[in-house]
Image (spheres, helix red, strand yellow):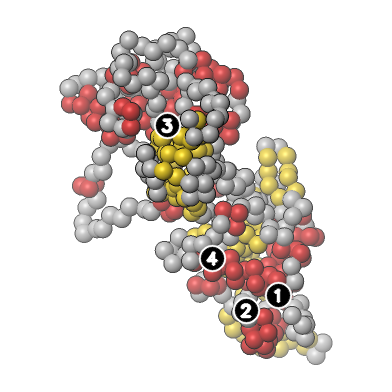
């Protein structure tokens, strides 16, 4: 017999963690190669994790709704194959993965390993050797001032005596009721010759941090309905706050006369759908104009790494797409500069349909270098978008409206009814100044205004 570790798969360069939605197998169940073990979710897309071997599901290390770092061992499968088992490490493997992925701080990781390898305290229950603590439990313990000795003395209701969130919260509540130690975080913990366990607690992702106090419904007065955010909305909220904290946002605005583009689409849309079996929307026309301008101003197609600007040679356009739930997802049109208008239309329609049917693959939502959000779809004429990190800019297209506009001609000025649209672009002021941002935005507006009404598709 041999034990094979099941690890949380890497789902994209910017994805550091994933949430377990559902286990399809329980410990003791037989599993086959490529059979779905569990469903996972990131802030971008839901996915399935298949088994990489035949065998028996020996152990599940994380339960549904837990957030797990990429690369962490989430389960173990017992197989009949003769394999040399890897020596187990005393440190929880998810903690090592978080250090390696997020910080790469080898010195601190070595300190944590040293701490984890220390002999067990006498207060540790003998029935729980090599006791495992999740980042969430460690985070609550650190914040509530629960010492290492106290933590090890808590009977766990989880698998193999594992301390769960409910166990640690119940312990804190019982201690308060008994008039025990203060619930404020302690500034010093027993060291055991290495770093205190609070240094491990900081490995908990921000999305796992929780208030240990129970929900107080009395804090809201009047006739109200309290609705818990769903998982995706919580992740969206976190990313929006992180983006504003990361990038100093500046937004520029421009107005474009898109009459030629509107008239052209009206003229060709029936023939286009008949010939290509696809609808032609304004989105591929917007992306086509953006791609042309990104080639002229490549700094808008970049990201920032410390004090370095990483200019992307690939042009991958993310397009913000609303889901039936009201949430937002950003599938990516890869290598948009290599597609003609028909190719763009087909790719955009396929991604949009997959998003609305919850059939996007992990690779469909990663690698974006610039984002377009079409506010006009919902009737909004203008908006101030938030940058989709780690990109440096996002462009919003407002609704197209007929307006009286002053037209300058050789014969003099006149007033005409034209199809007008506002464009807005938010950009990272660390690297994109107002001059470059405004120049790029106006270049996109000019591309749309100079649309060739006689062009072929």
The secondary structure type at the circle numbered 2 is: loop
| Rendered position, 415 above or below 148 | below
What is the distance, in whole Å, between disc 2 and disc 3 at their CAs? 48 Å
Question: Residue 322 versus residue 411: which sits nearer the camera?
Answer: 322
Q: Which mark is residue 278?
A: 2
Occupied quadrant, residue 129: top left
Question: Residue 137 versus residue 90: which sits nearer the camera?
Answer: 90
Reading the chain from its start, which is encountered first: label 1 or label 3?
A: 3
Tell me whether the residue at label 1 lies in contact with that at label 2, contact meaning CB atoms closer than 8 angstroms: yes
Residue 37: image location, x then y, percent? 45, 47
Q: Is residue 135 left or right of residue 113?
A: left
What is the distance, in whole Å, between disc 4 and disc 3 at their CAs? 34 Å
| Rendered position, 377 above or below 56 | below
* Few, some or many residues within 10 Å of mark 2 (<14, 14–19, 20+): some
Q: Residue at image x 58%, y 30%?
A: 100
Judging by the rendered image, the residue that carries numbered circle 3 is 135
Judging by the rendered image, the residue that carries numbered circle 1 is 342
Judging by the rendered image, the residue that carries numbered circle 4 is 354
* Few, some or many residues within 10 Å of mark 1 (<14, 14–19, 20+): some
| Rendered position, 260 above or below 187 | below
Q: Residue at image x 71%, y 50%?
A: 302
Q: Is residue 40 left or right of residue 396?
A: left
Reading the chain from its start, which is encountered first: label 4 or label 3?
A: 3
The secondary structure type at the circle numbered 1 is: helix
Query: Can residue 239 be seen in the rendering of this structure?
Result: no
């Amino acid at each position: 017999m041999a034990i094979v570790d099941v690890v949380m798969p890497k789902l994209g360069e910017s994805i550091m963690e994933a949430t377990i939605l559902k286990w399809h197998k329980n410990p003791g169940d037989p599993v086959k190669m490529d059979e779905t073990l569990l469903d996972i979710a990131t802030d971008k897309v839901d996915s399935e994790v298949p088994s990489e071997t035949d065998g028996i599901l020996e152990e599940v290390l994380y339960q549904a709704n837990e957030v797990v770092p990429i690369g962490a061992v989430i389960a173990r499968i017992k197989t009949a194959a003769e394999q040399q088992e890897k020596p187990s490490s005393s440190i929880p493997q998810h903690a090592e993965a978080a250090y390696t992925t997020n910080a790469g701080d080898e010195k601190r990781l070595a300190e944590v390993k040293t701490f984890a390898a220390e002999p067990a305290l006498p207060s540790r229950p003998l029935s729980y050797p090599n006791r495992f603590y999740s980042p969430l439990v460690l985070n609550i313990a650190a914040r509530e001032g629960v010492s290492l000795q106290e933590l090890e003395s808590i009977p766990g209701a989880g698998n193999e005596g594992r301390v769960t969130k409910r166990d640690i919260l119940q312990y804190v509540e019982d201690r308060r009721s008994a008039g025990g130690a203060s619930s404020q975080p302690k500034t010093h913990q027993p060291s055991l010759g290495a770093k205190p366990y609070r240094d491990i607690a900081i490995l908990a992702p921000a999305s796992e941090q929780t208030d240990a106090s129970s929900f107080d419904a009395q804090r809201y007065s009047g006739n109200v309905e309290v609705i818990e955010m769903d998982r995706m909305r919580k992740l969206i909220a976190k990313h929006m706050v992180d983006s504003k904290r990361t990038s100093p946002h500046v937004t520029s605005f421009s107005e474009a006369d898109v009459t030629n583009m509107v008239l052209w689409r009206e003229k060709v849309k029936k023939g286009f759908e008949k010939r290509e079996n696809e609808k032609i929307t304004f989105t591929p026309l917007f992306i086509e104009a953006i791609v042309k301008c990104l080639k002229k101003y490549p700094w808008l197609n970049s990201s920032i790494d410390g004090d370095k600007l990483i200019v992307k040679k690939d042009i991958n356009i993310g397009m913000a797409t609303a889901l039936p739930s009201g949430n937002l997802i950003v599938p990516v049109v890869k290598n948009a500069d290599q597609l003609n208008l028909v190719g763009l239309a087909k790719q955009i329609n396929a991604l949009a349909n997959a998003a609305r049917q919850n059939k996007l693959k992990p690779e469909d939502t990663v690698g974006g270098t610039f984002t377009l959000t079409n506010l006009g779809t919902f009737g909004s004429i203008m908006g101030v978008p938030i940058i989709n990190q780690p990109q440096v800019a996002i462009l919003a297209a407002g609704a197209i409206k007929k307006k009286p506009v002053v037209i300058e001609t050789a014969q003099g000025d006149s007033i005409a009814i034209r199809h007008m649209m506002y464009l807005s672009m938010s950009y990272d002021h660390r690297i994109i100044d107002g001059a470059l941002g405004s120049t790029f935005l106006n270049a996109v507006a000019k591309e749309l205004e100079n649309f060739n009404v006689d062009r072929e598709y």
